[in-house]
Image (cartoon, rainbow, N blue to C red):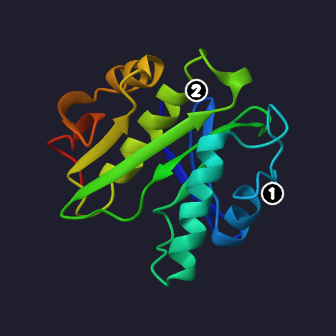
C-alpha cells in the first residue's frame, strides 16, 4: 500500500488502497455540523453523530480565527466509488508534538475495517508532517469497538484521562 497525497479544490486528499480521506473545509463543515451531507454521498444518507460534532469544532475554530487547513475533519470515503462511510480527523493542530485524533463510522459501514484503515492512513500522513511525534485518542470506557480499532492500528493504552480510555501512538523512528 502506498499513501498518495493530493489536493482537490483546496482540500487535502489522502488515498491508500480502498480508503480515501477528503478534507472538509470550514464551508463544508458548516453543512456537516447541521447534519447535512455537504457535497458528499453518505452510505446512510447523512453524516454520523461524531462527524457532525467534529464539523462543529472546525466551524468554531474557523470562527475564532484559529482553523489550520489539514488539522480538521476528513470524510472517510470508499476509493472505488467515493461514498462516504464516516469521518476522521484531528481535534486541532498538534500541541508539543502531540495531535489528538477522533473518528466515527456510519452505522452501515461498521465492522468492515474502515475505521482501522482510515486511522492508519491518517497516522502515516500525520507522521510525515514536521513536528508530529505522537497521536492521542480517547474513547468512552464502554466503547470496545473503538478501542479495538485503536489497538489494531498500533495504539497503546495509557493512563485514563478525565474518565476516558486513552491511547497513544508514537511516530516511527524514521518519520518526519
8 or 95: nearer the viewer:
95
Residue 78 lies, in percent from the top left, at 70, 33
**What is the C-alpha distance between the residues marked 1 and 2?**
21 Å
The number of discs equals 2
Name the image quarter holding the C terminus: bottom left
What residue is at 77 percent from the left and 40 percent from the top?
Answer: 82
Q: Is residue 85 left or right of residue 43?
A: left
Q: Can the viewer see residue 115?
A: yes
171 or 28: nearer the viewer:
28
Can you tell which quarter of the image residue 86 is in?
top right
Q: Is residue 41 above or below residue 65?
A: above
Q: Can the viewer see residue 10?
A: no
Q: Is residue 168 left or right of residue 153?
A: left
Image depth: mark 1 or mark 2 in front: 1
Query: Which residue carries the number 2 mark?
Result: 114
What residue is at 69 percent from the left and 36 percent from the top?
Answer: 79
Q: Of the residues under marks 1 and 2, which one precedes in the sequence?
A: 1
6 or 34: nearer the viewer:
34
Query: Which residue carries the number 1 mark?
Result: 38
Q: Is residue 23 above or below residue 81?
A: below
Can you tell which quarter of the image residue 41 is in?
top right
Residue 127 lies, in percent from the top left, at 30, 50
What label does residue 6 carry, if any? Answer: none
In contact (CB < 8 Å): disc 1 and disc 2: no
152 or 104: nearer the viewer:
104
What residue is at 22 percent from the left and 28 percent from the top?
Answer: 156
Residue 19 lies, in percent from the top left, at 60, 34
Residue 72 lies, in percent from the top left, at 51, 60
Q: Considering the numbered disc 1 on the image, is that residue within a helix, a strand or a loop? A: loop
Can you tell which quarter of the image residue 45 is in?
top right
Amino acid at each position: 500500500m502506498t499513501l498518495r497525497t493530493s489536493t482537490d479544490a483546496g482540500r487535502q486528499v489522502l488515498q491508500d488502497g480502498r480508503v480515501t480521506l477528503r478534507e472538509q473545509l470550514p464551508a463544508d463543515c458548516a453543512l456537516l455540523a447541521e447534519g447535512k451531507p455537504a457535497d458528499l454521498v453518505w452510505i446512510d444518507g447523512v453524516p454520523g453523530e461524531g462527524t457532525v460534532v467534529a464539523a462543529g469544532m472546525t466551524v468554531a475554530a474557523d470562527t475564532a480565527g484559529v482553523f489550520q487547513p489539514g488539522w480538521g475533519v476528513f470524510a472517510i470515503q470508499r476509493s472505488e466509488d467515493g461514498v462516504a462511510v464516516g469521518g476522521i480527523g484531528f481535534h486541532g493542530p498538534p500541541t508539543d508534538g502531540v495531535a489528538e485524533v477522533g473518528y466515527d463510522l456510519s452505522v452501515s459501514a461498521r465492522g468492515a475495517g474502515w475505521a482501522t484503515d482510515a486511522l492508519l492512513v491518517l497516522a502515516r500522513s500525520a507522521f510525515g508532517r514536521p513536528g508530529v511525534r505522537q497521536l492521542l485518542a480517547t474513547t468512552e470506557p464502554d466503547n470496545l469497538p473503538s478501542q479495538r480499532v485503536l489497538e489494531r492500528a498500533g495504539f497503546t493504552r495509557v493512563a485514563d484521562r478525565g474518565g476516558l480510555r486513552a491511547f497513544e501512538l508514537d511516530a516511527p523512528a524514521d518519520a518526519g
